[in-house]
Amino acid sequence: MSSETNNGNCLVAYFSWSGNTFTIAKQIAGLVGGDLFEIKPIDTYSQNYGEVVKRARQEIKMGETPELVKQKEQIEKYDVVFIGYPNWCDTFPAPVLTFLTTHDLRGKKVIPFCTHGGGGVGRSFSELAKQCIDSEVLKGISIDGYVVNENNVEIKDWIEKLTI
């Protein structure tokens, strides 16, 4: 898909802890001509990895939906929503659950992407699809955080194969 065919109807929403997911989100937005939106919790995560893992496990186990700094206004204007996040505890982080449960994605094409430290996609894509039952969830991509860069050919190839 080229940005000329998009007409600005793509949103690239992402949660990024280390910056890897942001790097991928920025690349996707550039390739599709989409708007970037950061999924950012009010209560930010520690920079200490061990503390982050402990908090993430608790939030995921309890199904928590932490309050976000802001909601994406006018979500209805987007036909395609990319949703990016790091794979935490084999799924997506709690702030992404907040985004999914507070934004109406019915009838939209939802496309997940995740970064990871070797764990791959885990169950995150299937868990995300369960939250988007009234959306068309397209094939996502997972990128190892150790190979994230601003010109990842794998991302470009993946986007060109999507039907959006």
Image (cartoon, rainbow, N blue to C red):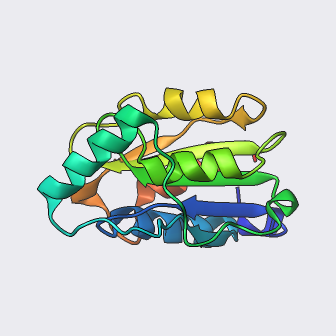
Tell me which residue sits at (68%, 34%) in the image: 132
Please tell me in which quadrant of the rendered image residue 121 appears: top left
Q: Is residue 102 left or right of residue 113?
A: right
Q: Is residue 121 visible?
A: no
- Looking at the picture, how far across and down is residue 82, in whole percent? 62, 53
Q: Nearest the camera: 66 or 110?
A: 66
Rendered position, 6 above or below 164: below
Please tell me in which quadrant of the rendered image residue 59 appears: top left
Q: Is residue 153 visible?
A: yes
Tell me which residue sits at (32%, 34%) in the image: 90
Tell me which residue sits at (62%, 71%) in the image: 70
How many tags in the picture?
0
Please tell me in which quadrant of the rendered image residue 33 appears: bottom right
Q: Nearest the camera: 116 or 128?
A: 128
- Looking at the picture, how far across and down is residue 50, in whole percent? 12, 54
- Looking at the picture, how far across and down is residue 15, in whole percent? 46, 61
Tell me which residue sits at (57%, 50%) in the image: 98
- Looking at the picture, how far across and down is residue 74, in whole percent? 83, 67
Q: Is residue 10 left or right of residue 148?
A: right
Q: Is residue 109 left or right of residue 69?
A: right
Q: Is residue 37 left or right of residue 87?
A: right
Rendered position, 28 above or below 81: below
The N terminus sits in image quarter = bottom right
